[in-house]
């Protein structure tokens, strides 16, 4: 009898609940501490559609990985400078990623800023970067400039995350050329999949011509609202389209993100107990479990 009860308990422990993507929802174990650092795996957060959660994901995934002892460099690669602002970094009168692109002999450390978050550094950007595409268009090997810049600091970090701007222009091609992997954030709303074919085509072209080993690390569903049928249907369609490439972790819709951005802090620092902070920590653990991050 005692044995049966024990068996029953074990069975229920083994039963992993089904998550929003329709697959078992694992907690993912806390990643083991690293005893040495680098070389970094470089991941671009990319989607030419605006406002899908690229910057929010870069900030909070970076902070989450940093909290697990990973040395993280977040590269602001958008002239809007939202990543820099979201981490409380003033962006005027400083050295930015633009200066590094323009003069690749320059030491990237000139631009690297330590944030208030332990283990998290940033290369900031500001509106100057909007001139980069025009300035770089006549450069030799213009698609590989960012790769050459990041190579110089890659050994000092475990992961480098690049927050792309909402376009598929030369800057984004530079980000994809510099990266080992790409994460595509998709907002769970009606037009989520519109344009994604073009993005995949761009990644394929970069793989063909510039960066043969780039992989799709995952599609991340953001701004998911389980209360609406609409959100659930969009997520279902995303899973139909991308299958196991859809990350199990799904980021819910919450006003905590705009609040955290205004405060210049990652949500993991601003409201660590909030479900949204927990979701990004889980995303960090999932990416380690998938081998996308050390
Ligand atoms: N899960 C979420 N729930 C609610 N709001 C969110 C969530 N994620 C991001 N936001 C908000 O949505 C807006 C767009 O997010 P974010 O800036 O991260 O997107 P983006 O893809 O980087 O945009 P852009 O293409 O302009 O760079 C911001 O105001 C952000 O605070
Ligand atoms: Mg952004």
Image: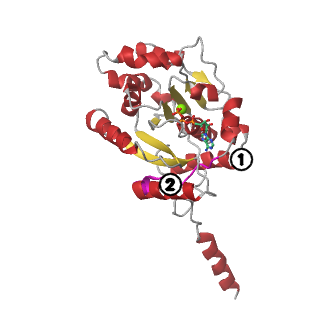
Residue drawn at the location 50% of the way across and 52% of the way down: 247
Q: Note whether 169 is above or below 68 in the view shown.
A: above
Q: Are marks 2 and 1 in contact (CB under 8 Å)?
A: no
6 or 221, which is in the foreground? 221
Q: Position of residue 67 (x, y in %)?
A: 64, 40
Vertical placement of residue 67 versus 94, above or below: below
Q: Nearer the viewer, residue 207 or 236?
A: 236
Query: Does any portion of residue 93 appear in the rendered image?
Result: yes
Question: What is the crowding at mark 1: few (fewer than 14 residues within 10 Å), some, or many (at least 20)?
Answer: few
Residue 218 lies, with reference to residue 81, above or below; the image says below
Give the tally of numbered discs. 2
Query: Which of the numbered marks, if any, corresponds to residue 274?
Result: 1
- Residue 52 within the segment the image draws in magenta: no
Residue 214 visible here:
no
The range drawn in magenta is 242-253
Q: How is the image coloured?
A: secondary structure
Q: Earlier in the sequence, mark 2 or mark 1?
A: 2
Residue at image location 46% in from the left, 42% down from the top: 183
Badge nearest the viewer, 2 or 1: 2
User: Is disc 2 surrounded by few (<14), some (14 to 19) or many (20+) residues within 10 Å?
Assistant: many
Helix, strand or loop for disc 2: helix
Q: Is residue 78 above or below residue 48?
A: above
Q: Position of residue 219 (x, y in %)?
A: 46, 48
User: Seen from this angle, which residue lies furthest left?
Assistant: 209
Viewer-proximal residue among 184 and 189: 189
Q: CA distance from mark 2 to mark 1?
A: 24 Å
Q: Principal SS element in the magenta part?
A: loop
Q: Quadrant of residue 5?
A: bottom right
Looking at the rendered image, the quarter that the N terminus falls into is bottom right
Secondary-structure class at tag 1: loop
Label of residue 234 in the image: 2
């Amino acid at each position: 009898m005692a044995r049966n009860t024990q068996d029953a308990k074990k069975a229920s422990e083994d039963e992993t609940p089904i998550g929003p993507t329709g697959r078992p929802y694992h907690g993912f174990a806390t990643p083991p501490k690293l005893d040495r650092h680098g070389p970094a795996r470089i991941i671009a957060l990319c989607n030419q559609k605006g406002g899908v959660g690229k910057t929010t994901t870069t900030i909070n995934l970076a902070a989450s990985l940093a909290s697990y002892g990973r040395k993280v460099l977040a590269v602001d690669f958008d002239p809007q400078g939202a990543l820099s602002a979201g981490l409380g970094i003033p962006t005027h009168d400083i050295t930015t990623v633009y200066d590094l692109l323009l003069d690749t002999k320059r030491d990237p450390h000139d631009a690297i800023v330590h944030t208030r978050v332990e283990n998290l550094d940033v290369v900031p950007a500001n509106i100057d970067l909007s001139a980069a595409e025009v300035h770089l268009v006549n450069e030799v090997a213009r698609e590989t400039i960012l790769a050459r810049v990041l190579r110089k600091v890659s050994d000092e970090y475990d992961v480098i995350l690049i927050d792309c701007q909402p376009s598929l222009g030369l800057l984004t091609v530079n980000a994809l050329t510099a990266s080992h992997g790409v994460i595509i954030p998709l907002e769970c709303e009606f037009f989520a999949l519109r344009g994604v074919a073009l993005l995949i085509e761009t990644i394929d072209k970069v793989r063909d011509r510039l960066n043969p080993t780039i992989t799709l690390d995952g599609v991340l569903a953001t701004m998911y609202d389980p209360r609406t049928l609409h959100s659930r249907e969009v997520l279902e369609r995303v899973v139909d389209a991308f299958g196991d490439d859809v990350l199990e972790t799904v980021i819910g819709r919450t006003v905590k993100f705009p609040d955290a951005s205004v405060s210049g802090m990652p949500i993991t620092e601003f409201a660590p107990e909030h479900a949204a902070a927990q979701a990004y920590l889980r995303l960090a653990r999932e990416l380690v479990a998938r081998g996308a991050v050390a």
